[in-house]
């Protein structure tokens, strides 16, 4: 049986070793497989958190201690809320983010650090805000840029972006709730301004068949787009709709990804300005036009679009339809365009 973690560190502290020898011994402990197993087991207690963070603070230039420490804390944080609170209470967010920033070239440090930050950010407004205050969003995005070809780091980093961009359901409209909403919005816009949205789109475009990557990237994109109209406009401007339709087709058997695609595409249909922008950005793209013309026709048949939509936007959509019908195009697109035209004209005549 392994000794209590606290006893290990007390034993090392009581010896009259030189500082370099003590660092060497602590490094050996951190790298020991059984120590990692202990950190994951149910017998772990909060002494492991304080000792690991103390060691990481004491030896910031020891990559082995930093990397292993972040990895063990990640595993420990998954065990209980108490351990997460302990990590935060002992300034663990700052210590781990400093590790991530210092060793951004190290794949394992980025992997462990991102998963730990993601775990801490999960459904916690206060921890998300603390991460943002310590520049965690920028640090994570920098790590993603360095390791943009590493699927495991991308998955972990996108998980961070997903969790820090979650839009919380407000309990009311008082000042404190408005402050929370404002800070959440600022985090989402910071992700965008730091290059996070472009990175998510690029990953979906390049690694669309990698479910582990797409799963995290799509979740983050949903939170960002539904939360911020400006971000959604940027996504549509940069051809994001094409990627959504591709993911919808590639992962049609995956209920979660299909639901996320339908959520974003449905949001476009419900936002007339976004819809017109998509039709104008893709004036000759068969898949995009076929999908939206068909959906517009269906919605008009079920009276989903009200009179104001028909009067204000119906003619503008009709103009794009007329352009498509006047040019050579595939039969399926022609059919959907004609259905859309007939539906719009019918409603306009009512």
Image (cartoon, helix red, strand yellow):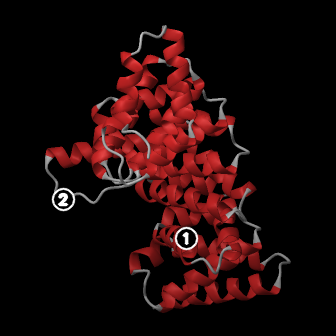
Q: Residue furthest left?
A: 174
342 or 1: nearer the viewer: 1
Q: Are marks 2 and 1 in contact (CB under 8 Å)?
A: no
Please identify the quarter of the rendering in which residue 294 is found: bottom right
Look at 26% across and 45% down and name the residue there. Answer: 180
Look at 76% across and 80% down and name the residue there. Answer: 325
Looking at the picture, does residue 3 appear above or below residue 80?
A: above
- Which residue is identified by label 1? 265
**Residue 116 shows up from this direction:** yes
**Residue 164 shows up from this direction:** no
Please identify the quarter of the rendering in which residue 212 is found: bottom right
Horizontally, residue 26 falls left or right of residue 236, namely: left
Q: Residue 149 location in percent, x, y? A: 74, 45
Please identify the quarter of the rendering in which residue 86 is found: top left
Q: Which mark is residue 40?
A: none
Q: Residue 309 location in percent, x, y? A: 44, 74
- Which residue is identified by label 2? 171
Kindly state the secondary structure of the residue where label 1 is placed: helix
Looking at the picture, does residue 231 appear above or below residue 329?
A: above
First reached walking from the N terminus: tag 2 or tag 1: 2
Q: Residue 336 location in percent, x, y? A: 69, 85
Horizontally, residue 201 falls left or right of residue 163, namely: right
Mark 1 surroundings: few (<14), some (14-19) or many (≥20) residues within 10 A? some
Look at 68% across and 52% down and name the residue there. Answer: 203
Q: Residue 263 location in percent, x, y? A: 49, 71
Kindly state the secondary structure of the residue where label 2 is placed: loop
Pair 2/1: label in front: 2
Q: CA distance from mark 2 to mark 1?
A: 28 Å
139 or 13: nearer the viewer: 13
Mark 2 surroundings: few (<14), some (14-19) or many (≥20) residues within 10 A? few
Looking at the picture, does residue 240 appear above or below residue 299?
A: above
How many numbered marks does the figure carry? 2
């Amino acid at each position: 049986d392994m000794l209590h973690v606290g006893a290990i560190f007390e034993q090392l502290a009581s010896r009259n070793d030189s500082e370099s020898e003590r660092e060497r011994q602590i490094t050996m402990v951190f790298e020991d497989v059984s120590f990692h197993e202990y950190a994951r087991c149910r017998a772990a207690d909060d002494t492991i958190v304080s000792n690991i963070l103390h060691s990481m603070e004491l030896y910031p230039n020891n990559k082995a201690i930093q990397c292993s420490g972040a990895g063990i804390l990640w595993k420990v944080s998954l065990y209980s809320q108490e351990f997460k609170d302990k990590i935060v209470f002992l300034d663990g967010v700052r210590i781990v983010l400093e590790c991530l920033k210092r060793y951004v070239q190290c794949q394992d440090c980025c992997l462990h650090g991102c998963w730990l930050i993601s775990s801490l950010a999960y459904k916690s407004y206060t921890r998300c805000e603390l991460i943002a205050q310590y520049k965690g969003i920028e640090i994570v995005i920098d790590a993603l840029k360095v390791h943009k070809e590493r699927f495991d780091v991308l998955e972990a980093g996108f998980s961070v972006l997903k969790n820090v961009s979650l839009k919380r359901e407000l309990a009311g409209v008082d000042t404190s709730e408005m402050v929370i909403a404002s800070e959440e919005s600022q985090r989402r816009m910071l992700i965008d301004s730091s290059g996070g949205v472009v990175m998510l789109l690029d990953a979906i475009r390049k690694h669309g068949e990698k479910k582990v990557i797409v799963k995290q990237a799509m979740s983050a994109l949903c939170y960002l787009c539904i939360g911020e109209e400006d971000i959604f406009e940027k996504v549509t401007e940069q051809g994001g709709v094409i990627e959504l339709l591709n993911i919808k087709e590639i992962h049609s058997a995956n209920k979660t990804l299909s639901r996320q695609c339908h959520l974003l595409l449905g949001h476009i249909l419900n936002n007339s300005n976004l819809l017109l922008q998509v039709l104008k950005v893709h004036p000759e793209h068969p898949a995009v036009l076929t999908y939206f013309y068909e959906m517009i026709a269906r919605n008009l048949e079920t009276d989903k679009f009200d009179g104001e939509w028909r009067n204000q936007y119906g003619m503008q959509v009709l103009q794009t339809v007329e352009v498509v019908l006047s040019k050579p195009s595939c039969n399926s697109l022609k059919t959907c365009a004609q259905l859309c035209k007939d539906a719009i004209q019918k409603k306009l005549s009512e």
